[in-house]
Amino acid sequence: MEMQEIEFTIDREGRVHLQVKGVKGSSCVDLTEPIEEALGGEVESRDFTSEYYEQSQVDTGRHLRREQGDSP
């Protein structure tokens, strides 16, 4: 399994930038949500990396079950 990493950067205006590495699919948003809430909950923008558009093994498993007619 690839190492998961969150990089924090605070700019001169005090804005916090998060970059998630090693997480495929939309689970990166779930991973950063508690951090965003702790910092005030206001997200100005999101820029997704190419990893966001890749399916994780969990995402792929859910997709296969739905195709087969099973409940998620």
Image (cartoon, rainbow, N blue to C red):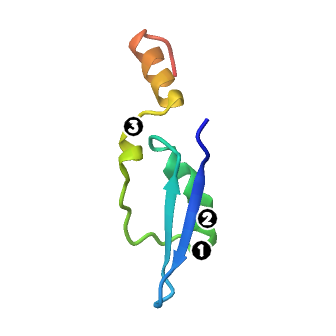
Disc 3 secondary structure class = loop
Residue shown at 39% from the left, 37% from the top: 54
Q: Which residue is mark 3?
A: 54
Q: Which mark is residue 35?
A: 2
Asked if the residue at tag 2 contacts the one at tag 1, i.e. Cβ–Cβ closer than 8 Å, the answer is yes
Disc 2 secondary structure class = helix
The residue carrying pointer 3 sits among few (fewer than 14), some (14 to 19) or many (20 or more) residues within 10 Å by Cα, namely some
Closer to viewer: mark 2 or mark 3: 3
Q: What amino acid type should be assigned to the residue bearing mark 1?
A: Leu
Of residues 16 and 22, the one drawn nearer to the viewer in this rendering: 22
In this rendering, is residue 61 above or below 54? above
Of the image marks 1 and 3, the number of the one nearer the N terminus: 1
Q: Is 57 on the left or on the right of 48, as rendered?
A: right
In this rendering, is residue 52 above or below 6? above
Q: What amino acid type should be assigned to the residue bearing mark 3?
A: Glu
Residue shown at 62% from the left, 60% from the top: 34
In this rendering, is residue 31 above or below 36? above
Residue 19 on image: x %, y %: 49, 62
Q: Which residue is mark 1?
A: 39
Q: What amino acid type should be assigned to the residue bearing mark 2?
A: Ile
Residue 41 on image: x %, y %: 54, 70
